[in-house]
Image (spheres, rainbow, N blue to C red):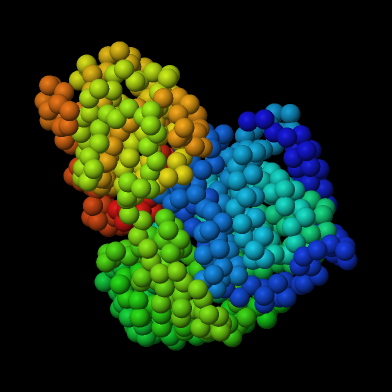
Amino acid sequence: MKKTSGRLVSALSAAALSVTALGAFSAVLPAQAAGLSGLDAKGITSQMVIGWNLGNTLDSSGTNLPSDAAPQKFATAWGNPVPTEDLIQTVKDGGFNTIRIPTTWYEHLEWDEGSQMYLINDQWMDFVKQTVDYAYDRDMFVILNVHHEDWVNVGEFTDATFQTASKKLTDIWSQVSEEFKDYDQHLIFEGMNEPRQTGLGGSVEWGAGDANSWSYINRLNAQFVSTVRGQGSAANKERLLMLPGYCASSTPETIRAIEIPANAGNVALSVHAYSPYFFTMATDAYANHSFPGASGYGEDYDGALSNMFNEFSSIMNEKNCPIIIGEFGASDFGNTEDRARWATSYLSKAKQAGIPCVLWDNNVPGNGTENGEAHGYIYRATNTWYPNSAPVVQAMMQVYGITPNLKPYEELKFDWSKVKIGDDWIELYREENGKEVASWKNFTVSGWQDYVNENYDFVMIYDSSSNPELVLQGTGKDSWNRIQSGTVSENAFMQYFSYADIMQGLGSESLSDMQNLFISASNSDMTAYALYAVPKGSVVAPTESVEPTETTTEAVAPTETETAEVTDVPVVTETESTPVEGETILGDADGNNTVELADIVLLQKYLLGMNVTVKAGAELNGDGVVDIFDLALLKHMLVH
């Protein structure tokens, strides 16, 4: 992707300045400059009040998309819709005045030989800026960070990994600080998210860290501060910068180990505190989701919160530096009243300590399951508040004397009036009331052969939480080609498939050898309403089209059942896309050809270092390593 020369030159200048930047931070914004200026770190955090996280969106990672893919493809890769101004307005109406935008950068870096820098893809930078502006333009505080980075979270901290991390951190923050150089103190930068060692077992990964890991992270924090301050703008010299400890742990010794660089200017300590854990997230035998209450170990929940915030207050006094809790929350176990009481206790203590807290929201509802990651508050399909979460938010706002405007939950339901069908669209299949298709099942359609060419796209009308697919079956027994869309549709009930998508999905196979076309569900149940062949240039055309990539190709052999059922090519024949023996089912950690709750339990045990083994299906995100990211994806898959 071509880089604009201005961005490149500015980034180079900032990188050069960062080496000697820690000496002068006295400059402030000119008096005539508009916006928030002149505050110290405590002055900024005192105005932040309470925040909300745009989780599992710009931080989607492990997508295997190329760096120049459309930003919307990345943002929707984990199942959430593209963020909109309406969503951010919903957050503000809910009483939040701060938004944290977790953002992954490593998949958007492109090595530039001339500058010897990792340059951020221009489309991605513009997309991040647009999302920031949605909140910034509403006078909200915005926290922008680096999140889920493969160069931050590594198997083990070594000199080699530090060199890589230092280089990428410097290159990313040089460009980000240049891009946002004139944004006032409403914009806050967070250097890293939960930096940790992922290859030494769960107790190390999510522990308190040690002297070696603390030193490693402190050096990266110092490089981050130097880079941002070295950009040179008055705004960046007084910008609030957040510094994490090992895995952003709330353990007092970890927070105390965070070193504040000399002449660092406005900084805050970044902490994540889903506390008490056995109330907020645990699903084991020691969990107790009642508040007030105690864990199976006897820990009193309210007392634990008091102790935690007392420790935080002591640390802030010791370091003369504020703390920001960048992530907190309590998973929805169907215990709404208990969560509301917990929220009141938690935030009352945070308010007394002067600590702003930012609620984690991944848009995953509880749905009556024992899911420790059900942190859904806003139903983003309609920008309304989940019934189990609205009372919790109401309790949060009462702590601060805020009256929120919480739009009641409204489910997104299919209706033919919500889709526009072009007069020139050719109907290949239509069922007025829809056809129910279970996950990974499919059915054939006829009459498609004349339209698989450069003159037509295909449009599927459907209702599902996961993107549907087309499947082309050829003459060979192993000819089973899944076609994924290379398009992001603005309509939640329409999925576009271009001719380029189809050819990409076929890979090396010939279109002339294809005998059957299937409408297929993917990892969620689906209701299929229609499939149309759409002439190029039709009045109703695809939006946000992107180039297909090699990684979207997946050739899966059909089962014997599939081959037998499609012999006569009926107009509608339901089959099941169960992989052949020896094929990996993503999410099937125990190898029983079913993705279920037992797979989550097994994978959790494996990541905690217990004496269990997992099958290849436990590796979901394609990075070749079974880790916490695969567990998160598996939980997300089952919830949806």
**Residue in view at x 54 percent, y 54 percent:** 84
**Residue 332 shows in the view:** yes
Rendering coords of residue 369 (x, y %): 27, 64
Q: Residue at x 36, y 80 (%)?
A: 338
**Horizontal and vertical percent for residue 463?**
31, 47
**Residue 52 located left or right of residue 458:** right
In this rendered view, identify the residue nearer to me: 172 or 77.
77
Above or below — where is 341 with respect to 282?
Answer: below
Q: Position of residue 515 (x, y in %)?
A: 23, 19
Q: Residue furthest front?
A: 423
In this rendering, would 336 be left or right of 378? Answer: left
Q: Nearer the viewer, residue 478 or 76?
A: 76
Judge left or right: residue 370 versus residue 159: left
User: Would you place residue 91 above or below residue 435 in this image?
Assistant: below
| Residue 297, image x, y percentages | 33, 79
Residue plotted at (36% across, 70% down): 387
Please say if 224 is above or below 505.
below
> In which image quadrant can residue 494 be found?
top left
